[in-house]
């Protein structure tokens, strides 16, 4: 059984036996989106960004403010420019040379498997499908469906005048369907996969592998945002600089946002040997964890994660040569040791801090599983050389503390919008 | 009370549910505070724990302040708290989820205390006389060469009250089937005797009960008490309520539902089982204590508030039994006032903490 939360522009709770009516509706409605100028789509989304922060159904959710910032016109234009090089490709054929022009056409129906770990993920996924003029069917987790429905309701009410024509946000919303179904139901999952001209998959390893094994159309493009790991590294010069404490404060925020459930959440921070002992750095971090706003300091955490935190704490309390800084509750934990390794994520604001001889010691830890490293090196040349080597080994994003969760383009080494369009050509006689 | 062994001996002589909560807290605190220095002296891991938490045993003011160790730590650390030459046996318990084995070192002193404690608890439910013991499992479950499991622990523990043991199941091609010759012998020769029964909850329901129904058997005895433990998660999957389970099992043994007794226990706390009374409450004996902790604040929960079950136990000098935090959730129902008349705290078990399922792009691990 497929539960449909949004169908043909109506916010409902309809049940369907199969995807046929949903696909038919999206296929018809996406034509209007394809015909909208990209500047109009950006304009409508930018208006949504301004509106959503006033909607109490939306603005209480962690990440809502960031969505609002991300939807600023300038940012959206930059996102499109990064992906398409020239935004005009989305609206028409652009000459490349005298007898050769290029354009970008939407792939069609983009089926999206949205993971539950990040509440705002469904929005970013849909926004990318909109900015590439596609129709969308998004399988959303039950817990995020109300939030994303509230956002799209706001978009439905927005209009924009452009070159004498009035455009409606509702037309974009009509090209989107939100669905829920049991992922273990192979038959429905297969239908969903076969409906796609493009599949966008967010998830852990097991989910990714099972979705990739489903049959699909021969022309179907598949974009995978799989499981990733992030960490941080500080060189001696940076640690001994005036900026160090601010960087630690920002790191504490990065650890706290999403309660360490995101692929961009850091789990380990490596510190080059410096005038500060690891214990001193731990005490500094403790101060910043304690200063977190209540909404980040105390977050709902699954009892199983709490049990993992309790177990890991006990291991460090019992062990020789390991130390720990903890508050009275399970709000955050700082684990300290000197082993040069990444640690299994515990989640729930558990950070492993480690002392290393040289920042270069972390290179051997880098694999294609590493998404982001926050790199704190003052010397720009040294930082660039470090980044070049780290990205060669597998890192997708080299960032600074406080920015690790920013939804940059490219993401996971992918330019998503670029993958959501078909690049087409028009040759003419010279 | 200068010698903790005497203190504990006194407790073990008393009826197990005779002391009010306040009184047992005072007794236990005194015993445990005297046991902790030896634990710290004999085990550097325990010494690390107290030192890093900056806790001195002599300054502990209440049982809630004794630092609990998560039960999983028996898989990763040697938690022996007596000299090596005093260890007479290491109890190895296979984990049901991870497959990693817990190691619980037992001294003669600990073993004797555990036997005394268990006898005292069983006596409260079974009376003075030993009984015929019916095991709803196969005989191999008690084979010393096999891995020690929760099923083994239950059979061995409860067998201390047996005058004769019968295994009601046997293994056939890896499956459990009714041991019909043994059941026939029982029904022809022992029907007018008092018996007690033990089985793993899921095995009782999924194999024994179903096969007894198919064979249209009834197992009537003079007096019967049926103890069962574990496996509720699987039964919930089959949508079997505790009430329905108890009714049906009581029916096939020709007794009342009040004689079907669910109990809670674990290999790391051998000697202590928390048995349901006729009101469905699990009672804490004099020589132990239970604290329900909020999994986030770690503070003791209010009554009826669900939290993690911590068990404090004064029986062992050979491993850190003094405060063990389980991965089970339960809630305290009351103190000293259960209508069954047993004193002390009484609680209910709710569920095990299920393994975490991290979904999405953060579901990763180091390589």
Image (cartoon, helix red, strand yellow):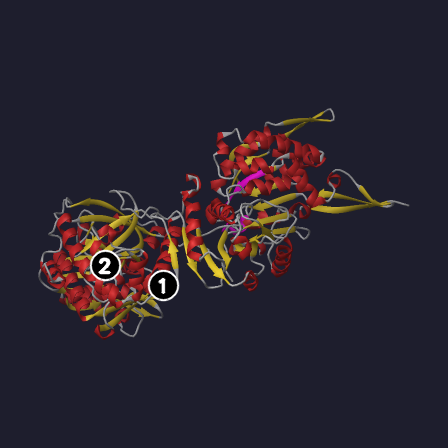
Residue A178 shown in magenta: yes
Q: Which residue lies furthest to the right in this view?
A: A430
| Residue B323 in view | yes
Residue A264 coordinates in the image, percent (x, y): 53, 50
Chain containing the residue with disc 1: A
| Residue B285 in view | no
Chain containing the residue with disc 2: B
Mark sitting on residue B322: 2
Residue B132 shown in magenta: no
Crowding at dot 2, Cα within 10 Å, few <14 / some 14-19 / many 20+, comes out as many
Q: Which residue lies furthest to the top in this view?
A: A164
Q: In which quarter of the image is the N terminus of chain B?
A: bottom left
Q: Magenta span covers which residues?
A: A177-188
Q: Is residue A315 left or right of residue B17?
A: right
For mark 1, give the secondary structure.
loop
Q: Distance between the residues labelled 2 and 1?
A: 19 Å
Residue A37 coordinates in the image, percent (x, y): 72, 34
Discs 2 and 1 lie in a common subunit: no
Residue A122 versus residue B203: which sits nearer the camera?
A122
Nearest-to-viewer mark from 2 and 1: 1
Residue B61 versus residue A394: which sits nearer the camera?
B61
Crowding at dot 1, Cα within 10 Å, few <14 / some 14-19 / many 20+, comes out as some
Q: In this view, does B157 lie above or below A119?
A: below
Q: Is residue B124 left or right of residue A147?
A: left
**Quadrant hosting residue B59:** bottom left
Residue A145 coordinates in the image, percent (x, y): 50, 38
Count numbered badges in the picture. 2
For mark 2, give the secondary structure.
loop
Mark sitting on residue B242: none
Q: In this view, does B206 lie above or below A246?
A: below
Mark sitting on residue A319: 1
Residue A62 coordinates in the image, percent (x, y): 49, 39
């Amino acid at each position: 059984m497929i539960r449909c939360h949004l169908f043909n522009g109506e916010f409902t709770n309809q049940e369907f036996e199969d995807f046929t009516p949903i696909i038919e509706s999206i296929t018809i409605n996406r034509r209007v989106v394809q015909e909208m100028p990209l500047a109009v789509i950006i304009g409508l989304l930018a208006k949504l960004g301004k509106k959503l922060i006033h909607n109490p159904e939306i603005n209480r959710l962690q990440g809502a403010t960031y969505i609002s910032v991300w939807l600023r016109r300038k940012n959206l234009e930059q996102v499109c420019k990064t992906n398409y090089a020239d935004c005009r490709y989305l609206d028409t054929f652009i000459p490349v040379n005298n007898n050769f022009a290029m354009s970008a056409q939407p792939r069609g129906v983009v089926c999206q498997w949205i993971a539950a770990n990040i509440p705002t993920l469904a929005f970013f996924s849909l926004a990318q499908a909109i900015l590439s003029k596609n129709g969308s069917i998004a399988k959303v987790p039950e817990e995020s469906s109300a939030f994303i429905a509230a956002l799209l309701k706001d978009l439905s009410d927005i209009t924009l005048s452009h070159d004498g024509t009035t455009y409606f946000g509702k037309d974009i919303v009509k090209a989107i369907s939100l669905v829920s179904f049991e992922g273990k139901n192979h038959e429905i999952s297969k239908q969903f996969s076969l409906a796609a001209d493009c599949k966008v998959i967010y998830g852990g390893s097991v989910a990714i592998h099972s979705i990739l094994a489903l049959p699909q159309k021969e022309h179907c493009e598949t974009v995978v945002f799989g499981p990733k790991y992030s960490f941080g590294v500080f060189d001696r010069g940076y640690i001994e600089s005036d900026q160090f404490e601010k960087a630690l404060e920002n790191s504490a925020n990065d650890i706290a946002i999403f309660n360490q459930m995101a692929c961009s959440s850091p789990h380990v921070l490596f510190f080059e040997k410096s005038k500060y002992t690891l214990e001193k750095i731990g005490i500094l971090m403790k101060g910043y964890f304690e200063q977190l706003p209540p909404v980040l300091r105390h977050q709902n955490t699954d009892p199983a994660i709490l049990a993992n935190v309790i177990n890991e704490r006990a291991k460090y309390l019992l062990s020789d040569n390991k130390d720990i800084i903890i508050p009275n509750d399970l709000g955050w934990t700082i684990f300290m040791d000197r082993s040069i390794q990444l640690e299994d994520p515990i989640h729930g604001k558990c950070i492993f801090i480690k002392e290393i001889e040289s920042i270069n010691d972390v290179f051997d830890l880098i694999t294609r599983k590493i998404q982001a490293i926050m790199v704190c090196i003052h010397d720009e040349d040294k930082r660039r050389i470090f980044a070049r080597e780290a990205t060669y080994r597998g890192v997708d994003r080299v960032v600074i503390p406080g920015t690790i969760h920013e939804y940059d383009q490219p993401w996971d080494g992918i330019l998503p919008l670029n993958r959501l369009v078909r690049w087409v050509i028009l040759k003419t006689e010279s | 009370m200068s010698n903790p062994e005497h203190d504990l001996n006194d407790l073990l002589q008393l009826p197990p549910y005779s002391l009010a909560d306040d009184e047992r807290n005072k007794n236990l605190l005194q015993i445990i505070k005297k046991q902790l220095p030896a634990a710290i002296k004999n085990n550097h891991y325990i010494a690390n724990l107290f030192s890093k938490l900056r806790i001195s045993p002599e300054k502990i003011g209440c049982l809630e302040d004794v630092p609990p160790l998560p039960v999983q730590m028996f898989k990763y650390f040697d938690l022996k708290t007596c000299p090596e030459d005093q260890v007479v046996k290491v109890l190895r318990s296979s984990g049901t989820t991870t497959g990693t084995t817990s190691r619980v070192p037992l001294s003669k002193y600990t073993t004797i205390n555990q036997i005394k404690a268990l006898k005292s608890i069983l006596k409260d439910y079974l009376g003075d006389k030993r009984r015929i013991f019916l095991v709803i499992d196969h005989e191999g479950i008690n084979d010393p060469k096999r891995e020690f499991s929760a099923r083994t622990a239950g059979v061995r523990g409860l067998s201390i009250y047996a005058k004769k043991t019968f295994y009601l199941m046997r293994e056939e091609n890896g499956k459990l089937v009714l041991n019909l010759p043994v059941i026939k012998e029982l029904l022809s020769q022992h029907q007018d005797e008092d018996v007690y029964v033990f089985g793993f909850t899921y095995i009782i329901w999924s194999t024994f009960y179903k096969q007894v129904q198919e064979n249209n058997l009834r197992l009537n005895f003079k007096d019967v008490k049926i103890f069962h433990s574990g496996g509720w998660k699987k039964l919930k999957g089959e949508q079997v309520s505790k009430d329905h389970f108890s009714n049906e099992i009581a029916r096939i043994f020709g007794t009342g539902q009040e004689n079907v007794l669910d109990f809670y226990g674990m290999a790391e706390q051998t000697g202590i089982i928390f048995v349901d009374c006729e009101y469905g409450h699990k009672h804490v004996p004099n020589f132990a204590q239970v604290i329900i902790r909020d999994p986030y604040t770690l503070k003791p929960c209010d009554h009826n508030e669900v939290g993690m079950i911590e068990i404090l136990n004064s029986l062992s000098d050979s491993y850190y039994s003094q405060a063990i935090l389980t991965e089970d959730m339960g809630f305290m129902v009351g103190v000293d006032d259960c209508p069954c008349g047993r004193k002390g705290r009484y609680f209910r078990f709710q569920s095990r903490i299920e393994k975490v399922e991290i979904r999405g792009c953060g579901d990763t691990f180091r390589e």
